[in-house]
Amino acid sequence: MRVEVTPDTDFEAGWTDPEVPNMFFTYDQTSIDECEYDEGSYWATYQPLVLTEDKTFTYLSPSGPVTFTLPPGTYGLIPS
Amino acid sequence: MPIPPGTKFHGVAPGVETENKGSSTRNAERDAYTIEEFGGGGGGVFDTDILYNLTNGHTFGRLSGNGTYPVGESGITVTDFIRDVLIMQSATFSATPIPAWEYNLTTIDINVVWQYSGGDNATLVRRVNDGTIEELQTGIPPGSGSFLDTTLPTFPEFVINYVYYYLNVFDADGNQLLQDVAIATQQAYIVPAVTTTVTADNSGRSPDETALIREWGNDLSSIEGVGTKISTYVPMTELRVYRGNTELSSVVITGDPNSETLVVSGDNPGSPTTNFVYATEVSDTQSDNDGLQFANKSTDQTVSMRPPMLFVGTSDTGSSPSIAQDIYDSYSTPTDGYFRLFEGEFADTFSTPSSMQNFSNYAWILYDSSLGDEELRQGGPTGPIVNFDDYGTHSVVNDFGVTVSVRLFRSPFTGPFSTGTNFYISSNG
């Protein structure tokens, strides 16, 4: 995925997707210097989680193990 | 159609309408390109292998030295080249057993946590002990995540098990860029702790007496052996207390306690003048499994049996037939002098007590006759020799009923020494 960023973008902040609470998504780049400059804008990329079939996850939460199943789809899209 | 080398491009804002205003002849010589031909989404494409030259040990991402980076038949977009080649892939990766993977714990979960960048996707796989690679998760995007592995097998006991997790990071074309490994290893077995504590059932008059230093004949003891489990899942099975090679008592341990105590009261070794040794052994399921006599053995507790040695001030003149017994019996408190327990030959400096400046008293020396003649020097080992009167060899019955053959020496006069005068007495005369 390609997304426009600015020099103010916090590359370490990342984002989450409530549908996939055991994962934390980040840009491929770690600073604005690594981003592509095109048409007067900076562009960063990231990789969402793409599922083509049901996938069951188990992760450890503060209250204990949590298991959930995700249907096919694209997850971890950067919040608008 | 590929874009010819050197072709120039001019762009306009997206909202501006364009029209080819050349003549029909010129228009026929112009080519039109779609943005996809620039590399799908606006980035350029390297369609020939990329030469690089990095000198003096410099590196750039995954490149170092001189060489050619092959782009393959379909080339590589600038975006992918930056992400997959010029950005060094990095990952952090850990595997934490839940609960703590103590020795012999056969069922656990393992929480795997990762973070990686500089790739397109990753797979998480595991290998249990020397088993095969098992795929746990694929298509993991860059960033961080966690996975609780709840599908581990039941592990065997009495070995150290381990699970390797690999995070394999790939580029968009499926080339592996990085492999990180996290290892969950079972804790090692720790032998149970074991101690032996000896107490003397009787006490003598010598200040030297302790639980492990006794006057001849004081050999009656009580022994406490304690085993303490260290590895939670390795139960103790038996505790045994020994004197020498003789097992005095044992207890079969049931119920998997953390600690077990075995007490042997009133052991009479029948060894009034020679040393004897106590120890405790503990067995557990590990030593039983290994066919060993014990899992751990306490340090030997040696009871040292020693003859009496006295250097005392008394009014006994030496005329009584029972003079040796009288001297032996005369010691009551440290103000009377010294009642020592030496192991075999001895040499020590004694500071005279107040009883020896009393003009009614003589200074007497009594010790095991088997040690031979004494040597007495004033001040210390190099001081002048002092001569005591030799009262010969006598027998005394000590406080514990042992008949002891002793040598007896007496100062030639009463009130012999002021308090604090040092005398070096050696059995190596």
Image (cartoon, coloured by chain):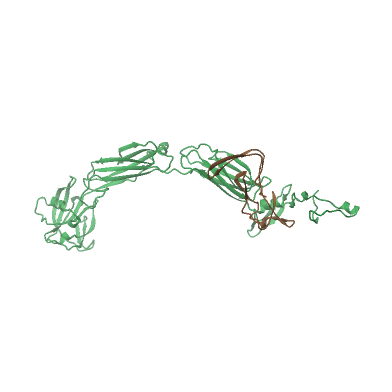
Chain colours: A brown, B green
Q: Classify residue A62 as left or right of residue B425.
A: right
Residue B196 vs residue B328, the one in the foreground: B196
Residue B427 vs residue B128, the one in the foreground: B128
Tell me residue A38's x, y (percent).
Answer: 73, 56
Tell me residue A15's x, y (percent).
Answer: 62, 50
Q: Is residue B103 visible?
A: yes
Tell me residue B115's x, y (percent).
Answer: 59, 49
Q: Is residue B69 visible?
A: no
Q: Classify residue B97 as left or right of residue B364.
A: right
Depicted B307 relative to depicted B245: above or below: below
The answer to which image quadrant residue B10 occupies is bottom right
Residue A75 vs residue B425, the one in the foreground: A75
Q: Classify residue B87 as left or right of residue B338.
A: right
Tell me residue B84's x, y (percent).
Answer: 66, 50
Instruction: Count how many numbered circles sit on residues in the image.
Output: 0
The answer to which image quadrant residue B12 occupies is bottom right
In the displayed image of the protein, which residue is found farthest to the right?
A: B24
Q: Quadrant of the C terminus of chain B?
A: bottom left
